[in-house]
């Protein structure tokens, strides 16, 4: 049991090789030969010839396959979704920003909601672009700010409640304010817990049909639930007079990077998607079977994906889609993929190649996707296309360096 727990902990940090070296492949020469499904070829074998073909036919075809075979279909937003600004301080961070806390209610009941934490720069001209993503430890953990409310879901952790600012190294709030960007985040547990609870303690039961006790085999797992929650937040951003809802970048690290890419795919209101070290089920090609595989992710985190995804464990070649097509679903919107060279569990090369193989779709729009075909050197970001990429020195984490590239990329497309 201790070994299994250690494996899970280390898998978060890309350090599983010495525990299970015989099963996990980190040798490029052992990557199997594979053929990727072509995003510009319909299921019937005909070619996609125009952006109209893509928008009207091929994109919905690919989206449906991801919905039913990987992440699971989400319900429509409830017409009863509503919002309440709970707290607002226009002199937060020593006057640098306005801090807001907004309750986003999923139904007409006040019992089911998530709490958005927002910082908006006070020095701005009109509405401001926004970076938005999930956090791991609670809103209060992203910054030492004493006035951030600790959510009820976090308080349930009891003695395990993280300290204020425990994750502040991952959220450069002041830097973003100075660069003219707002920041919003929500604790993932406010939407759905990150453990296999039989889909009983998050948003899933709110949408069960009579007699239903779990999602159907093609319905939402936890990653789809998180993405659905991010989309509900987008409903709020469209009402906020301080936010330019046409310039919202959804981002995430690790499993939240998978979520950000899927949120950007299902909700085209997100103007940009940013994936940091998202790996298998995120930006990395599944058919490479490098680092974390479909079998591994389904066994360790069985609640993340829909039940249908399990049929592709150790059978990635049978998948009707691969992750480069997830990147392609963002077209013509910009998307950024970030890797870390020591994070072999997430397969940096596989993440890069997804950008390469998504690029032809951007060509339909007369745009350059990823402007290079050879993986760049470490700490040499590629920012010039609609698909941006870097591989950073270091391990599985989201660092100041990553954020600096995200801001540069956003500047190119938002400003």
Image (cartoon, rainbow, N blue to C red):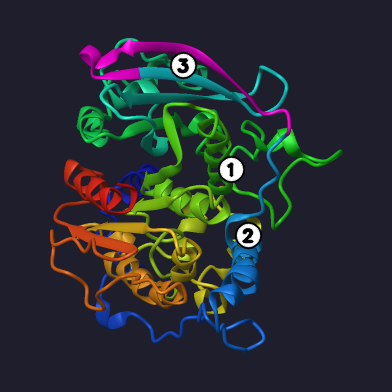
- Please say if the residues under marks 3 and 2 sit with CB atoms less than 8 Å apart: no
Queried whether the magenta region covers residue 96, the answer comes back as yes
Query: In this orientation, which residue lies closer to the viewer: 52 or 190?
Result: 52
Distance from label 3 to label 2 (Cα)? 33 Å
Which residues, given as a range, are shown in magenta?
A: 79-98
Image point (57%, 78%), residue name: 318
Tag nearer the camera, 3 or 2: 2
Does the magenta segment cover residue 256?
A: no
Q: Looking at the image, is mark 1 or mark 3 earlier in the sequence?
A: 3
Q: Where is residue 251 in the image (x, y as percent from the top left)?
A: 38, 45
Query: Closer to the camera: disc 1 or disc 3?
Result: 1
- Disc 3 packing (10 Å; few <14; some 14–19; many ≥20): few
Within 10 Å of disc 2 (Cα), the crowding (few <14, some 14-19, many 20+) is many
Quadrant in which the N terminus is drawn: top left
Q: Percent from the top left, x then y, of residue 280?
A: 42, 61
Q: Mark 2 points at which residue?
A: 67
Q: Residue at x 34, y 18 (%)?
A: 98
- 206 lies above or below 331: above
**Residue 228: numbered disc:** 1
Write the residue at 35% across / 32% down.
Answer: 183
């Amino acid at each position: 049991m201790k070994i299994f727990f250690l494996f899970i902990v280390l898998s978060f940090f890309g350090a599983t090789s010495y525990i299970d070296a015989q099963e996990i492949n980190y040798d490029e020469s052992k990557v199997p030969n594979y053929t990727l499904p072509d995003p510009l070829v319909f299921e019937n074998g005909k070619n996609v010839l125009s952006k109209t073909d893509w928008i009207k036919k091929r994109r919905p075809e690919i989206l449906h396959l991801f919905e039913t075979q990987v992440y699971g279909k989400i319900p429509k937003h409830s017409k009863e979704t509503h919002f309440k600004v709970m707290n607002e301080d226009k002199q937060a961070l020593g006057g640098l920003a306005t801090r807001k806390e907004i309750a986003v209610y999923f139904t007409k009941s006040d019992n089911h909601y998530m709490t958005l934490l927002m910082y908006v720069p006070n020095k701005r001209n009109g509405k401001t672009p926004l970076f938005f993503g999930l956090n791991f430890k609670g809103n209060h953990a992203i910054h030492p700010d004493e006035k951030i409310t600790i959510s009820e879901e976090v308080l349930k952790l009891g003695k395990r409640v993280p300290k204020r600012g425990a994750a502040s190294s991952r959220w450069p709030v002041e830097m973003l304010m100075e660069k003219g960007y707002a920041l919003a985040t929500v604790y993932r547990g406010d939407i759905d817990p990150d453990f296999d609870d039989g889909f009983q303690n998050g948003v899933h039961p709110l949408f069960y049909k009579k007699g239903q006790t779990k999602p159907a085999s093609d319905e939402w797992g936890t990653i789809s639930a998180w993405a659905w929650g991010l989309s509900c937040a987008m409903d709020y951003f469209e009402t906020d007079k301080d936010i330019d809802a046409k310039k919202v970048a959804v981002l995430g690290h690790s499993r939240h990077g998978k979520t950000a890419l899927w949120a950007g795919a299902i909700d085209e209101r997100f103007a940009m998607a940013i994936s940091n070290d998202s790996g298998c089920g995120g930006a990395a090609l599944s058919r490479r079977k490098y680092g974390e595989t479909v079998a591994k992710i389904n066994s360790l985190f069985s609640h993340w994906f829909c039940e249908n995804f399990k049929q592709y464990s150790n059978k990635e070649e049978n998948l009707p889609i691969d992750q480069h097509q997830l990147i392609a679903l963002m077209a013509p919107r910009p998307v950024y993929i970030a890797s870390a060279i020591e994070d072999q569990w997430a397969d940096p090369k596989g993440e890069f190649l997804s950008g390469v193989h998504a690029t032809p779709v951007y060509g339909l729009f007369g745009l350059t996707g990823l402007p290079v075909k050879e993986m760049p050197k470490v700490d040499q970001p590629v920012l010039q296309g609609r698909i941006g990429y870097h591989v950073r020195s270091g391990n599985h984490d989201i660092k100041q360096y990553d954020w600096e590239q995200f801001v540069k990329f956003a500047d190119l497309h938002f400003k």
